[in-house]
Image (spheres, rainbow, N blue to C red):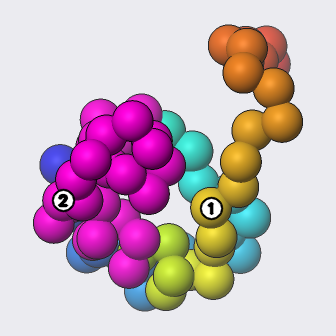
Amino acid sequence: MVLKYLKDTEANIDNVLIMMGDFNIRDSSWNPLFPNNSVHSELLMDIADSLNLSISSSTSQVPMRYANN
């Protein structure tokens, strides 16, 4: 559902600096232990490209937590 929403509204999104979320899409592009690519990951990458975003790698492999405020 999130991918459909992003695809349908991408023309109305301005000034995106970062896109984060658990899209629950397994893909070898961001998880080398997973051997396949999916149609959903290709759509997500197309949306990110249309917003001029690129994949960033984490510098630490620890869970991240942010304050609600």
| Residue 43 rendering spot, x and y as whole percentages | 27, 71
Looking at the image, which is closer to me, 6 or 24?
A: 24
In 3D space, how far apart are the residues under numbered discs 2 and 1 (Cα atoms)?
17 Å
Left or right: residue 8 versus residue 65 is left
Name the residue rendered at 16%, 66% in the picture.
39
How crowded is the residue under tag 1: few (<14 C-alpha within 10 Å), some, or many (20+)?
few
Q: Quadrant of the C terminus?
A: top right
Classify 59 as above or below 55.
above
Secondary structure under badge 2? loop
What amino acid is at disc 2?
Ser
How crowded is the residue under tag 2: few (<14 C-alpha within 10 Å), some, or many (20+)?
few
What amino acid is at disc 1?
Ile
| Residue 36 rendering spot, x and y as whole percentages | 22, 53
| Residue 29 rendering spot, x and y as whole percentages | 44, 57
Name the residue rendered at 63%, 83% in the picture.
52
Looking at the image, which is closer to me, 50 or 57?
A: 57
| Residue 14: quarter of image | bottom right
Q: Is residue 33 magenta?
A: yes
Left or right: residue 52 versus residue 11 is right
Given contact means CB atoms under 8 Å apart, are the residues at marks 2 and 1 in contact? no
Name the residue rendered at 49%, 86% in the picture.
50
Which mark, by number, is residue 69? none
Q: Is residue 66 magenta?
A: no
Secondary structure under badge 1? loop
Q: Can residue 3 be seen by looking at this rendering? A: no
The magenta segment is 22-46
Which mark, by number, is residue 38? 2
Residue at mark 1: 55
| Residue 31: quarter of image | top left
Magenta part mainly helix, strand or loop? loop
